[in-house]
Image (cartoon, coloured by chain):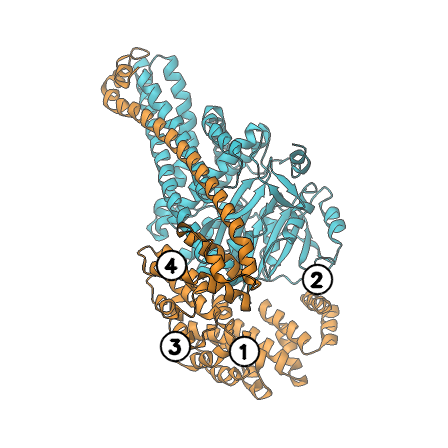
Chain colours: A cyan, B orange
């Protein structure tokens, strides 16, 4: 019996090592491709000033849709930030999703809102709209007050009231940089087949924010937000940039994405209980459904990632809130992939079915099972005396050192292309975080993702509370 | 302790599985650790070196800018001769100087921009040579620079770039020729417009319109030419609308008789909405009955500007159209026709679309 157990543990350890090797090799490949793509993108920026185009009459109008639920701490600053966007033709629709706090009152007071009329242009089913408001001070600012239905429902409400060919979906706790729309619209201008584009999300914790604008970029001082800042760099600059190069983007962050309204409406809008079934990962589900919708109907399309339009967001600073967030992300991903499982290994869906789906299924969705199992059996093997020094070293190499290399590479991509952390101290700290995150933080996130996966399989619903502190204006100033 | 030594010293007594599997595989992985460590450190060092290089480059730029700024401003004020500026440009600073001038060129117009162009002239042959570089990104950058600073001197070179294998290079060349208002090259651009059909058509139209009225004749020819691809004709129609080209109305009205390309018809109706005349009303009225909602919406807009009291009933009917887009255009057409009372009545009485009339009335108040 013991022999069988030992054999099983040892064999599983090899599976885990193979898993880590494959996973990190994929990361390495996407990092290398991202390296090439970022260089190309930077050169392209220098050779074609899109701003010159956008001064002209041809700029496509955009509606920025911002769902807000109990966002009294940040909604005014976020909206103010939107009003300063540097784009010739846009309007803002804030959707108050039945907030129980003073979100609507704050907005009304800050922007002098009055009741107004606005005809819906689509019929996606949503929770009832109570009233539509328009700002008397800023005529391009609209607020739709509706009964609570969740973020996706609020986005659908905004989509129903969108009268422009493009809409930008974002979070109420995010701050868009002034030129974010100018930059993210570029793929739509360069290729008429573009139906969606995602921008990069950066961590605002630790940065100085004035009047809704990030004026001084700093790495968060605390460890937990610091880890997340590094994680976001890796996920966006290496991951999404690399997958976009394969035309296999499966995720556009809900915090910042630009979409072609008509195809999103045709595809049924965001998934809710009233539409195609509720999910907590409405952002990924929409992108997957857009792929499916376009491919099943033979519609030529492109879904892009643009690395320099930035949305700044406040990330969780406590383990409890972070755990909840990661649990929800994992549930959302698992739900989306399981819902569209017919695409897996299906040639009809091209590289989405044959490349992106298998990767996301094996590594991103069910990966935590192997990772957590791997950490557990690794420890067990040591305790049982079945792990040789070489095995320990090998596990350490693929699970920790390889990961560290990839994080350092992500810092390199940031330095190569964007250099948003100008202080040398922040750069050095990023290296430190690249080492430290492997010693606890990654294992924790694997655990939270594992729990999220279990919840998804048990069909648990709900977002969990996300405590908002508001943007760190005073904290940063006092430094 | 070396890797080989490590391999020889297990922590614990190995299992039978380990004995079978581990030595060759794990030894390889152990070597991998060392390689990865070295790689991580090398990568880290590279990033730091990159930061140092970037910082130095930024400092060098700051120095160069400080050196050039005052004398260029004097040059723009015609208080310094070009030779005085050129004396400040070292042999290894020529490309940076051109980059620096590019920034001014983007911001300035008229005589001041011409001064900037003159300042760049001695250094442009180096840039022009890059237009044939094997790397498309470098060619694109070179065409952009030449387009900003080297026209009309290098107009033939830029025109040749319209046929570049890389669509981006061709697009930059087209943009440069159009922005410079080189009317004699418009036909060359129009002839290659099909290369850019992936681009946003409104953007292309506005790019063409930026040349000014001088481009209108060529656009009308393209619009009326049945051998020109439909997408190009739509772009031409949109561009003529941006130009408010009165002469385009007859061509547009003619094209409205054939509905086989609804998007082209809609583009032509928009032209009529902008510059049409009462004699075009009959075709517009007929298209209010089109099966295509895009055509009906454009026709409603045209009716709002061209029509009279006789068309009020049709517009009210369009307000009830199944397509909300047609209804929106009809409501705005009613506003355009000055039928405020009709809109007020609809706002007060319409069961499902009262909010549309209210919305349009609010837009009127803005």
**Residue furthest bottom in the image:** B279
Residue under circle 3?
B228
Mark with earlier residue (4, 3): 4
Residue under circle 4?
B127
Q: For the point 63% across and 79% down, which residue is it?
A: B305
Q: Position of residue B172 (x, y in %)?
A: 42, 63
Mark with earlier residue (1, 4): 4
Query: Relative to residue A191, is residue A280 depicted above or below?
Result: above
- The alpha-carbon separation of the residues under discs 2 and 1 comes to 30 Å
Residue under circle 1?
B271
**Residue furthest top in the image:** B13
SS label for mark 1: helix
Q: Position of residue B73 (x, y in %)?
A: 56, 58
Quick one: quadrant of the N terminus of chain B?
Answer: top left
Q: Chain of mark 1?
A: B
Both on one chain, marks 3 and 2? no
């Amino acid at each position: 019996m013991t022999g069988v157990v030992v054999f099983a543990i040892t064999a599983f350890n090899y599976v885990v090592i193979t898993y880590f090797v494959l996973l990190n090799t994929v990361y390495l490949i996407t990092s290398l491709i991202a390296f090439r793509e970022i260089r190309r993108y930077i050169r392209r920026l220098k050779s074609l000033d899109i701003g010159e185009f956008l001064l002209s009459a041809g700029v496509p109008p955009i509606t920025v849709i911002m769902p807000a639920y109990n966002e009294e701490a940040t909604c005014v600053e976020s909206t103010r930030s939107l009003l300063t966007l540097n784009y010739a033709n846009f309007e803002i629709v804030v959707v108050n999703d039945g907030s129980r706090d003073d979100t609507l009152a704050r907005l009304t007071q800050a922007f002098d809102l009055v009741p107004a009329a606005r005809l819906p242009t689509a019929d996606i089913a949503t929770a009832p709209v109570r009233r539509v408001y328009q700002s008397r001070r800023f005529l391009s600012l609209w607020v739709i007050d509706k009964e609570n239905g969740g973020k996706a429902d609020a986005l659908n409400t905004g989509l129903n009231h969108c009268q422009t060919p493009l809409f930008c979906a974002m979070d109420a706790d995010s701050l868009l940089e002034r030129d974010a729309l100018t930059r993210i619209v570029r793929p739509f201008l360069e290729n008429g087949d573009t139906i969606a584009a995602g921008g990069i999300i950066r961590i605002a914790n630790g940065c100085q924010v004035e009047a809704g604008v990030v004026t001084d970029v700093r790495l968060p001082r605390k460890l937990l937000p610091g880890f997340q800042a590094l994680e976001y760099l890796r996920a966006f600059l290496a991951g999404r940039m690399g997958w976009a190069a394969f035309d296999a983007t499966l995720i556009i962050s809900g915090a910042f994405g630009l979409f072609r309204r008509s195809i999103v409406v045709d595809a049924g809008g965001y998934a809710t209980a009233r539409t195609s079934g509720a999910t907590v990962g409405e952002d990924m589900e929409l992108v997957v459904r857009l792929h499916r919708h376009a491919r099943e109907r033979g519609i030529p399309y492109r879904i892009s990632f643009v690395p320099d339009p930035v949305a700044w967001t406040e990330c969780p600073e406590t383990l409890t809130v972070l755990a909840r967030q990661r649990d929800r992300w994992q549930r959302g991903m698992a739900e989306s992939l399981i819902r569209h499982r017919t695409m897996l290994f299906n040639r009809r869906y091209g590289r989405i079915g044959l490349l992106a789906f298998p990767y996301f299924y094996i590594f991103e969705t069910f990966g935590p099972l192997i990772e957590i199992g791997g950490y557990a059996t690794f420890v067990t093997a040591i305790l049982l005396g079945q792990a040789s020094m070489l095995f320990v070293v090998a596990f350490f190499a693929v699970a920790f050192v390889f990961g560290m290399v990839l994080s350092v590479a992500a810092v390199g991509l940031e330095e190569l292309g964007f250099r948003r952390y100008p202080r040398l101290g922040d750069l050095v700290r990023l290296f430190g975080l690249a080492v430290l995150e492997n010693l606890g933080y990654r294992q924790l996130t694997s655990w939270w993702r594992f729990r999220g996966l279990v919840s998804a399989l048990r069909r648990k619903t709900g977002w969990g509370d996300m405590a908002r502190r508001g943007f760190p204006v005073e904290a940063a100033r006092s430094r | 302790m070396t890797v080989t030594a490590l391999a020889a010293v297990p922590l614990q007594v190995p299992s039978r599985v380990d004995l079978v599997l581990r030595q060759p595989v794990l030894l390889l992985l152990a070597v991998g650790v060392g390689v990865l460590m070295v790689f991580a450190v090398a990568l880290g060092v590279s990033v730091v070196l990159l930061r140092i290089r970037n910082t130095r480059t930024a400092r060098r730029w700051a120095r160069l800018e400080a050196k050039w700024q005052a004398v260029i401003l004097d040059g723009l004020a015609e208080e310094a001769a070009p030779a005085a500026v050129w004396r400040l440009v070292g042999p290894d600073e020529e490309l940076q100087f051109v980059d620096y001038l590019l920034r001014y060129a983007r911001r300035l117009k008229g005589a001041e921009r011409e001064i900037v162009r003159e300042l760049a002239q001695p250094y442009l042959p180096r840039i022009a040579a890059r237009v044939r570089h094997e790397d498309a990104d470098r060619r694109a950058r070179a065409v952009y620079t030449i387009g900003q600073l080297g026209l009309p001197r290098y107009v033939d070179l830029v025109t040749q770039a319209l046929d570049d294998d890389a669509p981006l290079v061709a697009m930059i060349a087209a943009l440069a020729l159009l922005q410079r208002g080189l009317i004699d090259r418009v036909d060359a651009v129009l002839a290659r417009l099909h290369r850019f059909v992936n681009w946003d058509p409104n953007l292309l139209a506005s790019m063409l319109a930026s040349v000014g009225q001088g481009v209108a004749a060529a656009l009308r020819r393209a619009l009326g030419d049945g051998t020109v691809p439909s997408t190009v004709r739509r772009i031409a129609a949109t561009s003529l609308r941006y130009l408010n080209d009165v002469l385009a109305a007859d061509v547009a009205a003619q094209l409205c008789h054939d509905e086989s390309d609804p998007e082209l018809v809609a583009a032509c109706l928009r032209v009529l909405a902008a510059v049409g005349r009462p004699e075009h009303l009959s075709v517009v009225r007929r298209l209010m009955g089109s099966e295509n909602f895009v055509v009906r919406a454009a026709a409603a807009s045209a009716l709002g500007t061209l029509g009279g009291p006789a068309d009020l009933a049709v517009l009210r009917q369009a307000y009830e159209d199944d397509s909300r887009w047609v209804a929106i255009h009809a409501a705005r057409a009613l506003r355009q026709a000055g039928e405020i009372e009709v809109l007020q009545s609809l706002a007060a009485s319409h069961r499902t679309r009262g909010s549309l009339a209210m919305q349009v009335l609010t837009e009127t108040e803005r």
